[in-house]
Every structure is written in C-alpha cells, then in structure tokens.
Image (cartoon, rainbow, N blue to C red):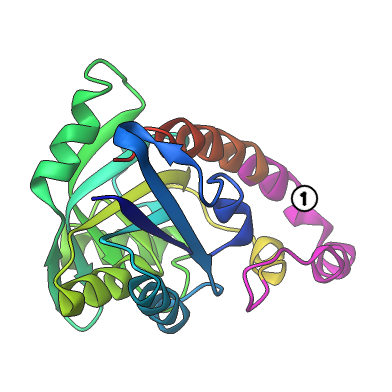
Amino acid sequence: MSRIGIVTGLQMEACLVRPGRRVAGDRSLLVACDGPGPRRAYEAARRLVEAGADGLVSFGLAGGLDPELAPGTAILPVAILDEDGSRFDCAEDWRRDLTAQAPRDPALQCVDVLATLSEPVASVEAKAALRARTGASAADMESAAVARAAMEAGLPFLAIRAISDRAGDTIPRAALKGMRADGHAAALPVLVHLAAHPGELGALIRLARQTGRAKRALAALAHRLG
C-alpha cells in the first residue's frame, strides 16, 4: 500500500494524524472526517477511495464494553459487527504487522469484535446489554461503514481504536451535547447543559482525562501505519 485512507468521526481524532505525512515504507496518509456516524463515515471513506487510497482505516475513540479494558488502551479488532448483523473482517496481515511493531506494549490489545452503532452507547446498562448480545469488547459509530466501503472497493481494512470510557462509565449528557454533526466540538451547548445539571461536572472531567489518555495512545499508533 502506498496511500492509506484514514476515516475519523471527530475532528480531534483527525488532528492526531497529519494528512500527507510520510510513514513506514514511504507510504502517505490521507485523512477524511465528515462527522460522527455511519452515513458520514461511509461518504468519507468513498471519497478517500476516489482519491486513490489503497487501504482504509477507521481511526478514533471507542467505548469500552469489556470491563477489563481500561481508558487509554488501544485496540485492534479482528472483526467489526454492524448493527444490522453484518460482519467485516479486518486485514489479518496488516493487523499482525502493526502489533509486531510493539510486541510488549501493554496499552495495545487485539480483541475479537468491535461493534458499530448509529448512536452512542452512553449508559452502563446499554453497554452491558450490547456486550451480552454481541460479545463485542468495544463500540464505535463508524468502523462498519468504513469496512463496508473497503469491501465494496476491494481494499484491505483495519480499525484502530482507543478506549475513552470504561464499561462501567455512564457518558454524561453534557459530553454528548458538545458533539456537532460535522465532527467539531461545541463548547456552548456543554456549558448551557452544565448550568442546568452541575452534578455532571465530575463525570465530564473524568471523561476528559480518560479521552486524553486515549488520544495519546492513538497518536502513538498513527506513525506505525503502513
């Protein structure tokens, strides 16, 4: 592969990868972020295919479903499970090559299944139900759509995700208020919500710290792509 297309749902995830940078083997990275969710991720992936990408990566944060996964843990799933039941396998050789570059990194784990949904899995109860139903270790909102675009184009696919919230964490509504459709963060809706629900501040601060760990794990993996 000479041009790797990376799809993110959030602009802060895209900022962890510099478009056009040269990586291992003189490969280059193309980055697209149209916002969160499967529809936007699919459109971004198709655009990268048209731009000449010869491999696609779903890159960004994920919510933990496995209680053993701590915030800041980077995961490389074997397969992606869409909410319609479709299953997409990640490129085994690509995943193996990436893990071989960090054989003793405790913050990098291979997991069997990553589930993709069209909405965030915010509550502890919803996370537990999803894990019981699918066996997935984590969940996101984009990977299945990117995998589908890769399959349609006959390209290899890989998902690189990092855990931002534990299985036992409820995502505060304030955090969800700050997620814009274009993937940018919006501070004002968060502040307005916190003014009415100040009890969420502690959980929001904790989530921000955990997200920081996840972002550092993702940034460390970005330069290993290839």
Q: Position of residue 71 (x, y in %)?
A: 47, 37
Residue placed under numbered mark 1 in the picture? 201
Residue at the (34%, 54%) spot, across then down: 4
- Residue 89 vertical placement versus 40 (above, below): above
Q: Quadrant of the C terminus?
A: top left
- Residue 213 percent location from the top left of the image: 55, 33
Residue 60 appears in the picture as rendered: no
Q: Is residue 203 magenta?
A: yes
| Residue 103: percent from left, percent from top | 21, 19
Tag 1: residue type? Leu
Rendered residue at 62%/69% (across/down): 183
The range drawn in magenta is 180-207
Is residue 149 in sight in this rendering?
yes
In the rendered image, the vertical position of residue 30 relative to residue 169, given as above or below = below
Which quarter of the picture shows residue 42? bottom left
Judged by its main secondary structure, the magenta piece is: helix
In magenta stretch: residue 144: no
Q: Closer to the camera, 224 or 40?
A: 224
Q: Secondary structure at mark 1?
A: helix
Instruction: Categorize mark 1 by other alpha carbons within 10 Å: few (<14), some (14-19), many (20+).
Output: some
Residue shown at 67% from the left, 61% from the top: 175
Q: Is residue 35 left or right of residue 92?
A: right
Q: In the rendered view, would you say 34 is above or below 143?
A: below
Q: Which of the pair 97/61 is nearer the observer? A: 97
Residue 123: percent from left, percent from top: 48, 63
Left or right: 32 as drawn, with respect to 112: right
Nearer to the camera, 191 or 125 = 191
